[in-house]
Structures are given as C-alpha cells and as structure tokens.
Image (spheres, rainbow, N blue to C red):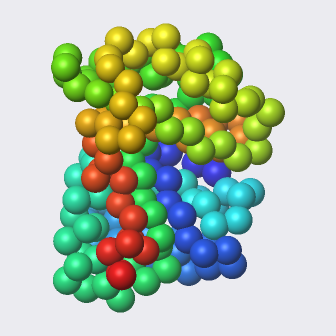
C-alpha cells in the first residue's frame, strides 16, 4: 500500500487489478506522469498517490465519467485525502485539527468514519476528533464532512464538502 496516499478508490471485489490499471491510466491522462496506485489487503480498496491536486482530480473525473463513462467502468468511489497519519487516536485528532481549520465559521460539519483492519472503535475516534472542530454539528445535512478513513496502520483524513466524494456508481444510475 502507498503510505502517503492522497486518493482512496473503491471497486468491486475481485476487480482490483483492472481498477488499478484504469486508475493509473486515468491519472496519467489527467497529467500525472508517475502516479502510484496500490492495492491494499482489503478487498475492493485501492490507494493512490498523485502529484495532482486530489480535489481537482475528483472534479475532472466527474466530467470524464459523464462524457466517457467507459473510462471509469471498474471504479466505484473516489475520495480525496489531505493527510495520512498513523492510526492512533492522538495522530488522528491532530490531523483532524489541521484539516478542519478550513471549515468557515458558521458552517456545519459531520464526522464520517470508515474503518478497516483496526481495533479502534468509531466512538473513541469521534470523541478524539470532535474535540478539535469548533463548528456546529449537523448529522443530516452538513456543509462539510470531516472524513476519517482508517486503513489498518494508516489513516487518511480530509475536510470536504459532500459533493467532493465522487460516487461513480451513483453517476451511472
């Protein structure tokens, strides 16, 4: 797994090889001459490191998916990651503090956790992270999502708007 990933991509189980090739080709097409795409020990989950802005990649892939859907046929979701830290409560909480600082005053947020291969509980992660975000909580319709993606020993953290998570499966419908 690429330790300093800035994209998490999901695919159907068993489609990881095809999705990795598709993602690498896509990132090269977008202008990254040396993307690093890696399969994880988790079925259907890839990580990638691109020299491109991962948020811009999401927007550009959204356009490609609408105009040329066959180019992203095996990819299901793409998530931009701002920081990667070791999977400890302290490190996650500090990363949340840094990324959540971009949430404007008066805006709401929700913490979303996706965890794989960890003994950390969602409630302890939320408790540690929420202390570092001084904004209004809105669980149903937040302006921002503080996303915590635990992938074994490493955790990706981002503060993003809900539409910045690209669900290619939903676009296809």
Q: Position of residue 109 (x, y in %)?
A: 35, 30
In the picture shown, does residue 35 fall above or below 158? below
Q: How many marks?
A: 0
Quadrant assignment for the C terminus? bottom left
Decide if residue 35 is on the left or right side of residue 85. Answer: left
Residue appearing at x 71%, y 58% in the figure = 42
In the picture shown, does residue 15 fall above or below 92? below
Q: Is there any visible trace of residue 124 in the rendered image?
A: yes
Q: Which residue is farthest front?
A: 140
Q: Position of residue 29 (x, y in %)?
A: 28, 72
Residue closer to the observer: 76 or 72: 76
Q: Position of residue 98 (x, y in %)?
A: 38, 18
Q: Position of residue 11 (x, y in %)?
A: 56, 71
Decide if residue 19 is on the left or right side of residue 98. Answer: right
Residue appearing at x 58%, y 16% in the figure = 128
**Quarter of the figure with residue 146:** top left
In the picture shown, does residue 141 fall above or below 91? below
Decide if residue 66 is on the left or right side of residue 113. Answer: left
Residue appearing at x 50%, y 38% in the figure = 112
Residue appearing at x 71%, y 35% in the figure = 153
Decide if residue 79 is on the left or right side of residue 38. Answer: left
Q: Is there any visible trace of residue 91 in the rendered image?
A: no
**Quarter of the figure with residue 33:** bottom left
């Amino acid at each position: 797994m690429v330790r300093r990933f800035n994209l998490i991509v999901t695919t159907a189980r068993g489609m990881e090889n095809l999705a990795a090739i598709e993602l690498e080709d896509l990132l090269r097409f977008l202008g990254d001459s040396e993307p690093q795409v890696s399969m994880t020990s988790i079925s259907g989950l890839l990580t990638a490191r691109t020299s491109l802005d991962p948020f811009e990649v999401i927007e550009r892939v959204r356009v490609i998916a609408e105009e040329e859907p066959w180019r992203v046929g095996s990819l299901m979701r793409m998530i931009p990651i701002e920081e990667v830290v070791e999977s400890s409560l302290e490190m996650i909480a500090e990363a949340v503090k840094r990324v959540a600082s971009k949430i404007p005053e008066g805006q709401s947020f929700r913490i979303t956790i996706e965890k794989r291969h960890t003994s950390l509980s969602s409630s302890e992660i939320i408790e540690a992270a929420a202390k570092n975000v001084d904004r209004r909580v809105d669980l149903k319709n937040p302006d921002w999502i503080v996303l915590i993606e635990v992938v074994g020993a490493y955790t990706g953290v981002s503060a993003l708007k809900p539409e910045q998570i690209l669900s290619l499966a939903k676009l296809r419908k």
